[in-house]
């Protein structure tokens, strides 16, 4: 056995010899020597490992042409940027792993125009001296939400941290036990609270918290009453949450500010479009919140950002906090955010032009027609590898908004015949560009809600190609 392994190992071609293979030389043209070397080393290491672990250790492993093909494949992969575009066929509109919101065309145009040149990012054109980067979105945020003051940072996690640090460091923050959320594995209310130096005072129970629970927790060290949007879960059954207006009244009575971390934060009431109900930012402010924080790239449909709105004195002190410098928003983000916010001046335009809003509100009939079109575009296929059917299904908003809302959609369903659904999902994912699909009950589901019209042909061509594939690997 050992002898076998040793002789196999000896059959692995030497690096220098491989590098001189004409096929490889041709594929290496224009690529750096380091990159080629890295590809060769990795392929040879993998083969050695396979031989030593006795996994599929057969002589085909050391076949020269197979090795060269592997190296060329690796070179191709290394040459591509790591961050690349893909097609979201999951039907989850605000998909955190896939980059959340995609930007509106008008926003992109502005980015291209401005990011390649200098700008008045921190320069006051009227006075001819240093200005503040925050002014560019402050006025429009105030205009859209009727907030007294506005401030933006890198993301909503930063917005919450900064607000707590400014208002409650060394003091107590009262929060309901039903709202101690974890978002995406790294944002957890108790952890953020600890980092900010605030002491968390939990009140109520998991399912029920009453106004008197908050009131009883208030003492001279209380700096803030916090409400957190339970973004990615719902407590159903025997439950009670204190409405923000009641919490605000309590805060006012005791002279303690009330903050709501809205998470997603939207400006438009989706129930008017026959969708679920989320409190809008305007409503939360009107209900008496002293501070509201939310993300720029969830329901708002803009770039990653954290938006803080509310009472002028509070926002002013947040702005003066030295942490702000470490959490500050980047120039390109600011550009994209301002342009996205400008679209909201006309809400019909916002619904039409902001992809996140457009996808969420896309009517079922449009989706059904699009799914039909996709099947037609694929054309006639032999069902040796898979067959296609249209079924009823649901898309989701994602990003911690309306977690329980199911958006009816028409789903293209692939029923694989000689591979498993997860193998088929891998083939789609390894495509260039990758197509990310859902697997459910031995079927691969493609939801046209999140596939852009410009991507339909690529999806159709890929499906047609996969249907002709003679062997799944
Ligand atoms: C998403 C979310 C956050 C974190 O926002 P990021 O933009 O991801 O930093 C914080 N709080 C709530 C309630 C959220 O839903």
Image (spheres, rainbow, N blue to C red):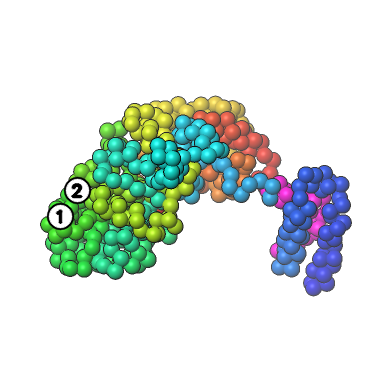
Q: Quadrant of the N terminus?
A: bottom right
Q: Secondary structure at mark 2?
A: loop
Total numbered labels: 2
Residue located at (25% from left, 64% from top): 173
- Boundaries of the magenta span: 55-77
Q: Pointer 2: what residue?
A: 288
Q: Is residue 68 magenta?
A: yes
Q: Please, is residue 285 above or below residue 257 in the view? A: above
**Could you say where residue 337 lies in the image, as x and y percent from the top left?**
42, 40
Is residue 112 toward the left or the right of residue 219 in the image? right
Magenta span: helix, strand or loop, mainly? helix
Residue located at (29% from left, 37% from top): 143
Q: Is residue 299 magenta?
A: no
Q: Is residue 398 visible?
A: no
Q: Pointer 1: what residue?
A: 252
Q: Distance from label 1 to label 2 (Cα)?
A: 9 Å
Is residue 85 toward the left or the right of residue 220 in the image? right
Q: Secondary structure at mark 1?
A: helix
């Amino acid at each position: 056995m050992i002898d076998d392994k040793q002789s196999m190992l000896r059959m692995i071609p030497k690096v220098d010899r491989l590098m001189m293979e004409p096929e490889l030389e041709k594929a290496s043209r224009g690529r750096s020597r380091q990159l080629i070397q890295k590809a060769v080393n990795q392929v040879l290491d993998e083969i050695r490992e396979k031989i030593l672990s006795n996994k599929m250790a057969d002589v085909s492993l050391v076949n020269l042409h197979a090795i060269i093909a592997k190296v060329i494949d690796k070179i191709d992969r290394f040459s591509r940027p790591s961050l690349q575009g893909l097609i979201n066929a999951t039907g989850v509109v605000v998909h955190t792993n896939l980059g959340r919101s995609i930007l509106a065309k008008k926003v992109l145009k502005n980015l291209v125009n401005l990011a390649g040149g200098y700008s008045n990012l921190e320069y006051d054109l009227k006075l001819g001296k240093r200005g503040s980067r925050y002014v560019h979105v402050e006025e429009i945020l105030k205009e859209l939400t009727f907030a007294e003051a506005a401030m933006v940072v890198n993301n909503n996690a930063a917005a919450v941290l900064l607000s707590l640090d400014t208002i409650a460091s060394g003091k107590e923050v009262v929060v309901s036990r039903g709202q101690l959320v974890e978002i995406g594995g790294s944002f957890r209310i108790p952890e953020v609270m600890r980092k900010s130096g605030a002491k968390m005072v939990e009140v109520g129970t998991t399912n029920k918290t009453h106004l008197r629970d908050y009131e009883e927790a208030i003492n001279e060290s209380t700096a803030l009453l916090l409400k957190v949007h339970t973004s990615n879960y719902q407590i159903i059954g025997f439950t009670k949450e204190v409405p923000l207006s009641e919490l605000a009244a309590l805060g006012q009575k005791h002279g303690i500010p009330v903050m709501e971390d809205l998470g997603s934060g939207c400006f438009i009431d989706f129930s008017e479009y026959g969708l679920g109900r989320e409190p809008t930012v305007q409503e939360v402010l009107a209900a008496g919140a002293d501070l509201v924080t939310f993300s720029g790239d969830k329901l708002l449909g803009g770039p990653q950002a954290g938006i803080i709105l509310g009472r002028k004195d509070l926002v002013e002190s947040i702005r003066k906090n030295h942490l702000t410098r470490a959490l500050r928003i980047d120039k390109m983000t600011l550009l994209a955010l301002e342009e996205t916010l400008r679209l909201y001046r006309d809400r019909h335009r916002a619904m039409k032009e902001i992809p996140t809003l457009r996808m969420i509100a896309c009517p079922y009939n449009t989706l059904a027609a699009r799914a039909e079109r996709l099947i037609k575009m694929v054309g006639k296929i032999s069902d040796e590898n898979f067959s296609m059917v249209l079924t009823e299904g649901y898309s989701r908003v994602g990003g911690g908004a309306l977690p329980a809302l199911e958006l009816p959609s028409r789903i293209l369903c692939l029923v694989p015949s000689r591979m498993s659904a997860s193998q088929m999902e891998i083939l789609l994912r390894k495509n260039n560009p990758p197509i990310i699909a859902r697997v459910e009950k031995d079927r691969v589901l493609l939801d046209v809600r999140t596939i852009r019209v410009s991507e339909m042909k690529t999806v159709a061509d890929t499906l047609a190609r996969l249907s002709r594939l003679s062997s799944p690997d």
